[in-house]
Image (tube, helix red, strand yellow):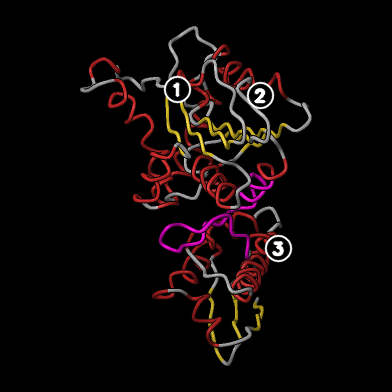
């Protein structure tokens, strides 16, 4: 069994094959097929007609993606194959050209999965967005990118990033330094994302001006946050009282994004997660979006997806 896929140019073929033909080898190994290129034609051959068909569909989808001007990565190839398993490989084109923000080094930040794209759309069109999912799905990074984009477009006057200072098996009191130095390690992922988007100098200038604030959740009590883009990270580690306190800080012309992973709760035994409660209580409330990421949205190393699936299987058997 074989199928022919026509390519527009030799440059498209070079991009599709990747460095040392790594992209094509990935497809060959996944479907047990052989892929040859000659005279702008790709020949996909193999013993299983269904596998040949699926490999050809993946190649066509990736070729169209390249044709739209997008660079191809191993993550794109793996994601397209996972989409093809559900006959949705045509959705790859939804990811073309959707730039959220430009980093300080001129690199465009784009959604890498359909789920990430939907998450960004939810943030754009709702006042409060709750993003729930496993590690590596870009929940925090994309939220920070959306915040920086809103600030640059003068839609908000400041960016406020916060997270609860809850220990993952360690104690705050044993860390050296004053309170700010003690909580800095908990806020590090937020700093990293901001440095990436803005650069260290711009970040420091905006911090001194008060246009950016990075603080523990406890610092939010008693405030009303107007004209702000507010991100609560690691929200699974809030209590119900803390979550209600945070949600009621919302002021006029502000947006809130709440992110968390309900499989990684570090609260003491007996304490209910405020994020879990909020998902249940706020479901169906107008202008509040609740988006759930899956392991398909993981854009870290392939092993991260495998680890998440393994833990899910383990949890189901318990």
Quarter of the image where one finds residue 172: top left
Residue 251 in the image, given as x and y percentages of width and height? 65, 27
Please tell me which residue lies in front, 223 or 283: 223
Q: Is residue 31 above or below residue 261?
A: below
Q: Give the CA separation, mark 2 to mark 1.
A: 18 Å
Return the disc, 2 or 1, that comes first in the chain's sequence.
1
Which residue matches tag 1?
Answer: 164
Query: In terms of sequence position, does the residue under pointer 3 or pointer 1 come before the other?
Result: 3
Q: Is residue 21 left or right of residue 35?
A: left
**Quadrant showing the N terminus:** bottom right
Residue tagged 3: 90
Helix, strand or loop at disc 3? helix
Residue located at (33% from left, 30% from top): 184
Position of residue 160 relative to residue 83, above or below, is: above
- Residue 289: percent from the left, percent from the top? 70, 34
The answer to whether marks 2 and 1 mark residues whose Cβ atoms lie closer than 8 Å is no
| Mark 1 closeness class: few <14, some 14–19, many ≥20 residues within 10 Å | many
How far apart marks 3 and 1 lie (CA) works out to 40 Å
Q: Residue 314 lies in magenta, yes or no?
A: no
Element at label 2: helix
Q: Which residues are magenta?
A: 97-121
Around disc 3, counting alpha carbons within 10 Å, would you say few (fewer than 14), some (14 to 19), or many (20 or more)?
Answer: some
Q: Which residue is mark 2?
A: 279
- Residue 276 location, x and y as percent? 60, 20
- How far is the residue under mark 2 from the one under mark 3? 31 Å
Q: Nearer the viewer, mark 2 or mark 1?
A: 1
Count of numbered badges drawn on the protein: 3
Mark 2 crowdedness (10 Å alpha carbons): few <14, some 14-19, many ≥20: some
Identity of the residue furthest to the top in this view: 270
């Amino acid at each position: 069994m074989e199928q022919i896929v026509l390519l527009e140019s030799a440059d498209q073929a070079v991009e599709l094959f990747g460095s040392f033909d790594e992209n094509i080898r990935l497809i060959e190994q996944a479907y047990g097929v052989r892929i040859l290129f000659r005279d702008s034609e790709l020949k996909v051959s193999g013993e299983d007609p269904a596998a040949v068909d699926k490999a050809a569909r993946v190649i066509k989808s990736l070729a169209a993606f390249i044709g739209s001007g997008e660079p191809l990565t191993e993550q794109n190839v793996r994601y397209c194959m996972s989409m093809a398993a559900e006959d949705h490989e045509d959705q790859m084109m939804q990811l073309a050209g959707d730039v959220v923000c430009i980093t300080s080094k001129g690199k465009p930040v784009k959604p890498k999965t359909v789920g990430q794209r939907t998450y960004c759309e939810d943030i754009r069109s709702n006042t409060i967005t709750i993003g729930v999912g496993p590690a590596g799905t870009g929940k925090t990074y994309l939220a920070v990118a959306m915040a920086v984009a809103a600030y640059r477009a003068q839609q908000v006057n400041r960016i406020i990033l916060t997270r609860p200072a809850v220990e993952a098996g360690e104690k705050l009191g044993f860390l050296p330094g004053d309170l700010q130095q003690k909580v800095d390690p908990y806020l590090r992922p937020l700093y990293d994302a901001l440095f990436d988007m803005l650069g260290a100098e711009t970040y420091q200038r905006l911090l001194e001006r008060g246009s950016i604030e990075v603080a523990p959740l406890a610092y939010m009590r008693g405030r009303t946050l107007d004209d702000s883009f507010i991100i609560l990270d690691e929200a699974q580690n809030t209590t119900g009282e803390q979550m209600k306190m945070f949600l009621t800080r919302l002021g006029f012309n502000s947006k809130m994004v709440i992110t968390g992973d309900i499989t990684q709760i570090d609260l003491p035994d007996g304490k209910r997660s405020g994020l879990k409660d909020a998902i249940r209580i706020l479901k169906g409330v107008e202008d509040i979006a609740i988006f759930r990421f899956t392991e398909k949205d993981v854009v870290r190393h392939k092993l991260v997806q495998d680890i998440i699936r393994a833990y899910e299987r383990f949890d189901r058997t318990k």
